[in-house]
Image (tube, helix red, strand yellow):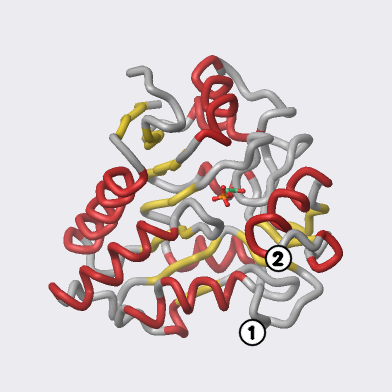
Amino acid sequence: MKFLKFENEIEASKYVSQEIIKEIKENNKAILGLATGSTPIKTYEFLSKDFSLNKTDWSKVSSFNLDEYLGIPEYDEQSYRTFMNKTLFNNINIKLENTHFPNKENNYDDLISKAGGIDFQLLGIGVNGHIGFNEPGSLENSLTRVVDLTEETIEVNAKKFFDGDISLVPHQAISMGLKSIMRAKKIILMALGKSKTETIKKLIKCKNFDINFPASILVSHPNVTIVYDKECLNNEI
Ligand code: PGA
């Protein structure tokens, strides 16, 4: 695992957006694994800005998002489909039919393999070490499946996206598994801000997979970069 520190969220997000643009320029049919949540929002802003200024061509790019809530309609205001359309897809020339989200019917891991596998996977990390919605207890060989969200994740997401109303947050989601994520050729995990300090300190110390800390799976991946900002951790690693 490589760790890269940036001055702030803006600089970290600029770097990650440039890495994504580089990936697309090297391979115009790049297959991207994308994340939702507060962490990638600025990165998507930079990508949207890049498209309006430089017209980077996304027309042959495909994307596979990590997860989607269950129990709300696909185009609900709070769905991850809506989040992605608003923050990125509507602002670039990606074809919406090339943008994918897991659901109970689409056999997501097969769909990803048939497309050729994920070239570049973007990840956030939950305070409890979850990646995607792989909560503590997720198995090393887990594939895309229905998952129950922990109380902690429901509370965090209620605060960030549902005006604090826990009753509005779905209790289940469908998420790529840890094994699905590990199949990506290259991974960038972003950790921004104070709330992730302890999580990243824990990740630095990981040597092996710890079922209680899902992000620890990444220690055995050959191409992972952890992008963090000073507010998260002021140390070089
Ligand atoms: P966040 O969520 O980006 O909103 O902090 C990250 C995650 O839960 O994976």
**Badge 2 amino acid:** Phe
Q: Quadrant of residue 98?
A: bottom left
Most foreground residue, 128 or 187: 128
| Residue at the limit of the structure toward the left, as seen here | 54
Ligand 1 within 8 Å of disc 2? The answer is: no
Q: Which residue is mark 1?
A: 75
Is 153 placed above or below 44 here?
above
In the rendered view of the protein, which quadrant contains the C terminus?
top left
**Badge 1 amino acid:** Tyr
Is 118 placed above or below 225 here?
below
SS for callout 2:
loop
x and y percentages locating residue 201 in the rendered image? 53, 20
Q: Residue at x 59, y 19 (%)?
A: 208
Most foreground residue, 75 or 207: 75
Label 2 crowd bin: few (<14), some (14–19), many (20+), radius 10 Å: some
Q: Answer whether labels 2 and 1 touch (C-beta < 8 Å).
A: no
Left or right of residue 192, residue 163 in this image: right
Disc sitting over residue 162 in the figure: 2
SS for callout 1:
loop
Marks 2 and 1, Cα distance to the nearest angstrom?
16 Å
